Amino acid sequence: MTTSERAAVPVHASAARPPDRRLRLIFILGALSAIAPLSIDMYLPALPQVSRDLSTGAVQAQLTLTACVVGLAVGQIVAGPLSDRWGRRRPLLIGLGVYAVASLLCVFAPTVETFIGLRLVQGAAGAAGIVIARAVVRDLYDGVEAAKFFSMLMLVNGLAPILAPVLGGQLLRFTPWPGVFAALSGIGVLMFLASLLGLRETLPVERRETGGMRATLSTFRALLVDRSFVAPALAGGLGFAAMFTYISGSPFVLQDLYGLSPQAFSIVFGINALGIVLVGQVSGWLAGRVSLDRLLAAGLVIVAVGGVGLLVAVITGVGLVGVLPALFLVVSGQGLVLPNSTALALSGRPPNVAGSASALLGLGQFAIGGATAPLAGIAGSGTALPMALTIAVTALGAAAVARVASQN
């Protein structure tokens, strides 16, 4: 089945539900999908402060981001297959409970090494929310309808990157950086309660995977040789890596190099994230009118143009007048890249492997993103060139993958 044919698969009958239940589902799944930006973006304005307080450098401070991202990647590989066997609710609630506790323990981390370890646990636990949210969508929707629903989720989880750094920046006016993690612990508790009370089981017992670890590994192998999965997953992963490089490097570049205050940085970051929300809604409106492959390709072109523009702006030294518009393109283009690459990769997968497919998809995104994060600060905070070069290379790589896949 081609990706175009797969995109035409109709919505499951079970997806027809009252508007109030659909809105509740959008809110809860959107919040769960926002665990990554909440865990990362809310903490971004505090990175320079953490570096000073823990007497460490920019690279070590950025490793606290990498640890969280590695946890988000590895945790999905565990939680996704478990949700195929146990159902969606049980591993989700366990993950959210551990996330709340790990976030609270971050408040008391005495050294950067301890802090990095706790961030790893925090990310691994929070991964359950991300991977299971995608699996729930696949339980209920497919193809174009899945792409539309993922775009709708961006109305909720798109607010996280807008509000998180703003909230983080404001918290830093009244509390040192550990206060950010106390707030994240409280958010984890609220997500746990919302999921416990408002999210029903979407994978009934008769549709669950019963083959154990051997069946899971067989599913992984089948997905990794399936071009209809690998191409959108890899393109989306490289596109996500471009954005994550921006997430990791921009606090130092925009604050230390270009002189923005934590509050001004939060505003710039929020404007860029608003671009994701708006473009995501355009993507949802176009889904069904334009093929998902073309929407993904258009998003990757926008990200690549922004990446190249950023590199040119940094090399020529034009300053924020060139840097900020380029970063806006890199980030807002994700509104086309993320929902459509996800829908293409998951469409047509049986419900009993949706968690495993979602896990591999998430692993690719966060593993590539985690690998690129330290590169943004490899030359210190005195230059923006490493960040710009990494964004340009990953963005162009994503566009190249999509181009090659479309020709085969």
Image (cartoon, grey):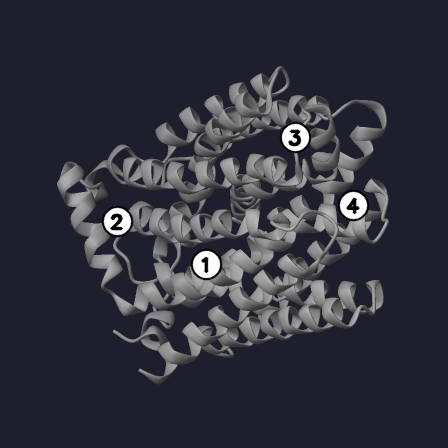
Look at discs 4 and 3 and give the one toward the viewer. Answer: 3
Three-letter amino acid code at disc 1?
Answer: Gly
Alpha carbon separation for disc pair 1 and 4: 25 Å
Identity of the residue drawn at 48% across and 78% down: 294
Chain-order first, disc 3 or disc 1: 3
Front position in the image: 94 or 375:
375
Task: Give the residue at mark 3.
Answer: 56
* Quarter containing the N terminus: bottom left
Q: Identify the element where label 3 is drawn.
A: loop
Alpha carbon separation for disc pair 4 and 2: 39 Å
- Horizontally, residue 118 falls left or right of residue 253, namely left
**Residue 401 horizontal/vertical position (percent):** 41, 73
The reply to whether callout 3 and callout 1 are in contact (CB within 8 Å) is no
Identity of the residue drawn at 71% across and 57% down: 384
Residue 69 in sight here = yes
Alpha carbon separation for disc pair 4 and 3: 23 Å
**Residue 250 horizontal/vertical position (percent):** 70, 51
* Location of residue 316 with respect to 233 vertically, above or below: below
Chain-order first, disc 2 or disc 1: 1
Neighbour tally class for label 2: few under 14, some 14-19, many 20 plus, Cα within 10 Å = many
Chain-order first, disc 3 or disc 2: 3
Task: Give the residue at mark 1.
Answer: 237
Look at discs 4 and 2 and give the one toward the viewer. Answer: 4
Chain-order first, disc 1 or disc 4: 1
Neighbour tally class for label 4: few under 14, some 14-19, many 20 plus, Cα within 10 Å = many
